[in-house]
Image (cartoon, helix red, strand yellow):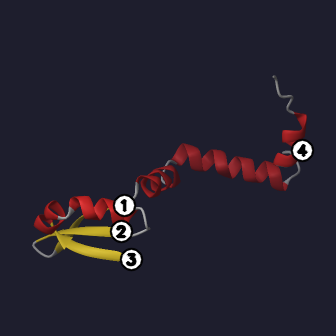
Amino acid sequence: MVKTLSIQEAKDKLPGIIEKLRSGDFVVVEKQGKPIAGIVDFEDMEDFIELNNASLQKQIQNGYKEFKTGKANPARAFLKTLKYKK
């Protein structure tokens, strides 16, 4: 759920906002009726940053191409090759 708050409301309700982020809510902060910021859960922010990282996107695309052309092994096959130390 997306909730919109003024800057003052966001300041006043910050502890409650943080709790709601854990349940998947998003908060848009407005100044004079215009959106200026968003408050999201940290994991969502990490996902956003990773998806906007050009270098990471290139690595993902290259890995996908290798997988599609049979140059990469499925994860299950890789995990079978690992030897665990006690």
Q: Residues within 10 Å of mark 1 (few under 14, many from 20)?
A: many
Q: Residues within 10 Å of mark 4 (few under 14, many from 20)?
A: few
Pointers 1 and 2 in contact (C-beta within 8 Å):
yes
| Mark pair 2, 3: CA separation | 6 Å
Pointers 2 and 3 in contact (C-beta within 8 Å):
yes
User: Is residue 49 toward the left or the right of residue 67 in the image?
Assistant: left
Q: Which mark is residue 81?
A: none
Judging depth in this view, the residue of 69 and 48 nearest the camera is 48
Quarter of the figure with the N terminus: bottom left
Tell me residue 77's x, y (percent). 89, 44
Q: Residue at x 29, y 75 (%)?
A: 3
Give the residue type that dot 1 points to.
Val
Badge count:
4
Q: Nearer the viewer, mark 4 or mark 3?
A: 3
Work out whether mark 4 precedes mark 2 in sequence or the reverse, and give the earlier one.
2
| Mark pair 4, 1: CA separation | 37 Å
Q: Residue at x 15, y 60 (%)?
A: 11
Q: Residue at x 52, y 55 (%)?
A: 51
Q: Compared with residue 59, is residue 44 higher up or lower down, i.e. above or below?
A: below
Work out whether mark 1 precedes mark 2 in sequence or the reverse, and give the earlier one.
2
Give the residue type that dot 3 points to.
Met
| Mark pair 4, 2: CA separation | 39 Å
| Mark pair 4, 3: CA separation | 40 Å
Q: Badge 1 is on which residue?
A: 40
Q: Compared with residue 38, is residue 64 higher up or lower down, i.e. above or below?
A: above
Q: Which mark is residue 77?
A: 4
**Element under disc 1:** loop
Give the residue type that dot 4 points to.
Ala
Tell me residue 29's x, y (percent). 22, 67
Pointers 1 and 3 in contact (C-beta within 8 Å):
no
